[in-house]
Image (cartoon, grey):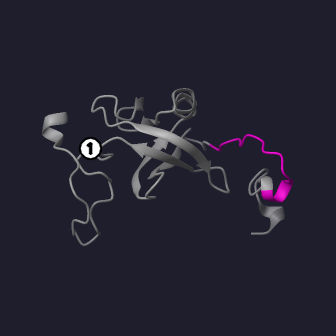
Amino acid sequence: MTDADAEPGAGEDAEAGGDAAEPIDVDFGEDGLVPAVAQDADSREVLMLAYVSPAALERTRETGEAHYYSRSRDELWHKGGSSGHTQAVREIRVDCDADALLYLVEQNVGACHTGHRSCFHRTVDGERVGERAFDPDEVY
């Protein structure tokens, strides 16, 4: 793909356009959602993947805690709202196409509803590579 083929605004950033930072217009696509990876801000461990709507992003920015959009429940949700295992968001990054987000977070206890710190606690061969951080039967 050449620069002429790129979507307007795609790939434009402070490095290409100068020193002044300007807010990025996130591309929420046809379904109104973008994928967001939550990553531990210190260890850089990938904790989870979820989807974000414009309202979820706005709420995250307002509160400093991660909010996502539940596709299965069709509603906005505050991460840790029922478990208390919240994510304090230190920084929100957007990818080069402005169609995916990275939340750099401070995870309180575990991110996964199965009790693990990370949702990525298994290999595709079924090997467990992560430890449980809490007992989900006691939390939910």
In the rendered structure, which amino acid carries the disc numbered 1? His
Which residue reaches farthest bottom? 125
Q: Residue at coordinates 74% horizontally, 54% vertically from top-left? A: 10
Quarter of image, res 15: bottom right
Q: Is residue 115 left or right of residue 58?
A: left
Q: Check if residue 24 falls in the magenta segment.
A: yes
Above or below 29: residue 5: below
Q: Is residue 39 visible?
A: yes
Q: Is residue 9 left or right of residue 127?
A: right
Magenta stretch: helix, strand or loop mostly: loop
Q: Residue at coordinates 40% horizontally, 31% vertically from top-left? A: 77
Q: Residues within 10 Å of mark 1 (few under 14, many from 20)?
A: some
Q: Check if residue 94 falls in the magenta segment.
A: no
Q: Is residue 140 visible?
A: no
Under circle 1, the secondary element is loop
Q: Is residue 1 left or right of residue 68?
A: right
Residue 99 rendering spot, x and y as whole percentages: 61, 50
Position of the N terminus, as image quadrant, is: bottom right
Magenta range is 15-27
Q: Which residue is mark 1?
A: 113
Position of the C terminus, as image quadrant, is: top left
Q: Residue at coordinates 24% horizontally, 72% vertically from top-left? A: 125
Of residues 109 and 102, the one drawn nearer to the viewer in this rendering: 109
Q: Is residue 32 left or right of residue 86?
A: right
Above or below 82: residue 24: below
Residue 56 rendering spot, x and y as whole percentages: 51, 32
Residue 41 rendering spot, x and y as whole percentages: 48, 51
Of residues 99 and 121, the one drawn nearer to the viewer in this rendering: 121
